[in-house]
Amino acid sequence: MRKARERYARYYQTYAKDHPEDWQWFDIEWSQIRQAWESASESYDLVLDYLEVMSDFMKARGMLRDLIQWDQKGADFAQVRDQSEARALLLNNIAVCYQELGEQLKALETYEKALTIRRDKGDKRGETQTLINIGHAFYESGDLDRSVDIYQQALDLARENHDTYQEGAVLNNIGAVHKSLGNFEKALEYYNRSLEIRSESGDKTGQAACLNNIGCLYLDSSNVDSAQSFLERALSLTREVGDRANEATVISNLGLLYKANGNLPEAIKLIEQAINIGQEIDQKRLVATALNGLGLIYRMLDDHQMALDYFERAYSVARKSGYQVIEGVVVNNIGLVHADFEDWVRAREFYEGALEIFRKTNYKPGEKEVLNKLSAIEKTNKET
């Protein structure tokens, strides 16, 4: 009976390995794939083989909670078997899922465990990947100095190991740091170099990420035509590989493009589409960000009550996601609406709440913005 169950699991493992981009098959067979996992989880070797081919599918389809449980099962097996390299890989993967879910503290704690193991074992490639991930976690908190320092460590290791895949990933991330610093030309240089490397290696998911980032860069510089071209290319690639989370991200960015163009009905339509995808795949962070975007659009339309409703919905989702930076952004925006109502007491209350979150997460851009708003309230109160 056990051999029959193992053959059942091996069938799905073999198909997934031979058809790595057939996400439609994965969706159709998901209930059977999950059942086969129950058989696979009795065998250490089969667990690792199964995770190796199913993880990318599960991540692309937004099944992060399931993947954390599966990876933890593998990590526990690896610890019992004293297979430290396999355990480090699985811990790193678990941390990636936590980060995608916005659970930053759990992500950093788990990354550090993986990094310690990889350094102890002299696993340079694994060390590079974990450094890239840690750098991204600090980037998301707005700690750009620490982020770029860690990225540079990762870049040096990637080049030392002649690993173009990792080099492409870290170049893209350094580009994002320069974008945040307002260095357009430098950011574009890093993004284009990353895109070149990823195109040469056939990494379609990585190409889509670069195209999306270049599109956003052009959008920020008000070059709407170029932005649309890059974002549409990114959307095509995300749909080709079945990456629903990044598909929703690109759709949301296209919504922001239409917002910049003044086509607010189309912007709302696209962002609502991104929200629907985010809800389907339980990407609370994505949903909170998109709801916040809708709030900004309705505020632009001077529909302050509707804006407040969306900001409050975004806040509720952000709290559940654990992603504190977006929580702080939304709290700040709720303060903005109260300022629109000239309710300075409530506005100050929310600004101070946002300031507390930004300081807790060391998110410097948000802290600076809120301090400016509090200063403006003080000035208004003195004048009146």
Image (spheres, rainbow, N blue to C red):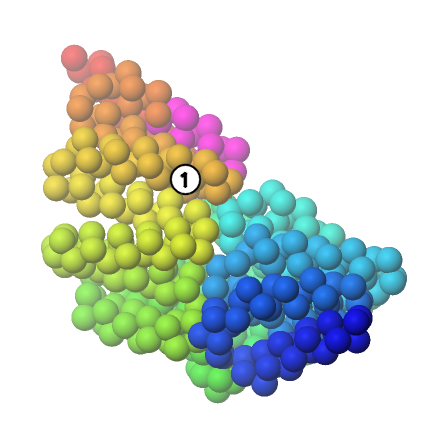
Q: Position of residue 1 (x, y in %)?
A: 79, 71
Residue ID at (18%, 70%): 225
Magenta-drawn segment: 351-365
Q: Position of residue 50 (x, y in %)?
A: 68, 71
Which image quadrant is residue 339 in? top left
Residue identified by numbered label 1: 317
Front residue (pair 114, 285): 285
Residue ID at (19%, 66%): 224
- Disc 1 crowd rating (10 Å Cα; few below 14, some 14-19, many 20+) is many
Residue positioned most to the front: 1
Q: Is residue 219 left or right of residue 19?
A: left
Which image quadrant is residue 86 in? bottom right
Q: Is residue 375 left or right of residue 107?
A: left
| Residue 355 part of the magenta segment | yes
- Residue 160 in view: no
Q: Main secondary structure of the magenta part?
A: helix
Badge count: 1
Q: Amino acid at mark 1?
A: Val
Which image quadrant is residue 301 in? top left
Q: Position of residue 80 (x, y in %)?
A: 86, 58
Residue ID at (23%, 69%): 228
In the displayed structure, 108 sits above or below 217; it is: above
| Residue 223 part of the magenta segment | no
Residue ID at (18%, 41%): 298
Front residue (pair 153, 7): 7
Label 1 secondary element: helix
In the displayed structure, 19 sits above or below 300; it is: below
Quadrant containing the C terminus in the rendered view? top left
- Residue 39 in view: yes
